[in-house]
Amino acid sequence: MSDAQQPPQHVRYEHAGALATITLDRPEARNAYSDEMCTQLVEALDRADLDAEIRCVILTGAGKSFHAGGDIKAMRERSGMFAGDPAELRARYVHGIQAVPRRIAEFGKPLIAAINGAAIGAGLDLACMCDIRIARAGAQLGSTFVKVGLVPGDGGAYFLTRVLGFARALELMLTGRVITAEQALEIGLVHEVAPAERLLEVATERAQAIAQHPPMAVQLTKRAAYRSYHADMATALELAASYQGIVQNLEDHQRALTPKP
């Protein structure tokens, strides 16, 4: 395939030691979704999950925005993921943008959203799919689908309610109001707010704090938390016993018990 035929690269992947950084790289469109971005984001997550050296992943955006959600220009033109009749649109969502939440739901390693700017619509939803959210001071966040006559087609109604609680999430979705990172911290939508110039530094510090622990213990703790959230107590306890049986027989466990000199 010639360079002219190569699809545009809308996701950048970088690897340094035990950490990987995935950057949404479409700054001219405020990192709004494109078909290529959906595909490339899933591919980047696959790459990080399959690399045994990677223990934690940071997701961020290029330029001044984290992720603007849907591409307004494509909406107006009814092109790309917004093209077609109702049946075609449903298929585009199922096989396109919804591939992202399905992949993240099965992502085995901790995923930190470094929200470097506006996280709007599907951009906020993507941040809510991550395990930890650190926002730049002054960043704006909003579930704004109703403002453009849409619903959260990427699963935002599922993720936002679980992160924020039903009542607060519903209010944000129905009003479409945009809040600041500081307000998001007050209501528990983000875990931390960092100065703009230190956002990636802080995210890296948090990722390194996770990466220093035995990787299988970290990954099974994450899995146990998510699986137990939707389970009854008996199922959660059985799962915990099974996972404990695995990690207690690993060399990492024995090394962690050895007194440090």
Image (spheres, rainbow, N blue to C red):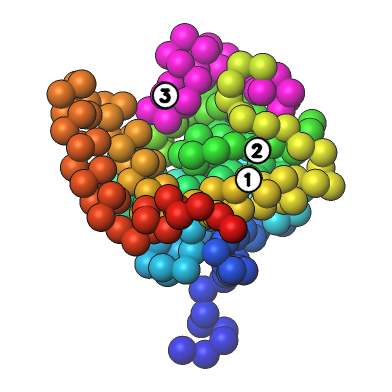
Q: Viewed as shown, does residue 97 lie left or right of 205?
A: left
Q: Nearer the viewer, residue 39 or 80?
A: 39
The part of the image, by quadrant, that contains residue 72 is: top right
Magenta stretch: includes residue 184: yes
Badge 2 local density, few (<14 within 10 Å), some, or many (20+)? many
Q: Secondary structure at mark 2?
A: strand
User: Which residue was labeled with disc 2?
Assistant: 134
Amino acid type, mark 1:
Arg
Task: Report x, y in % for residue 194.
Answer: 76, 37
User: Which residue was labeled with disc 1?
Assistant: 206
Q: Residue at x 27, y 29 (%)?
A: 228
Task: Report x, y in % for residue 168.
Answer: 52, 12
Boundaries of the magenta span:
158-185
Q: Earlier in the sequence, mark 2 or mark 3?
A: 2
Q: Nearer the viewer, residue 223 or 107?
A: 223
Q: Secondary structure at mark 3?
A: helix
Residue 228 visible in the picture: yes
User: Which residue was labeled with disc 3?
Assistant: 162
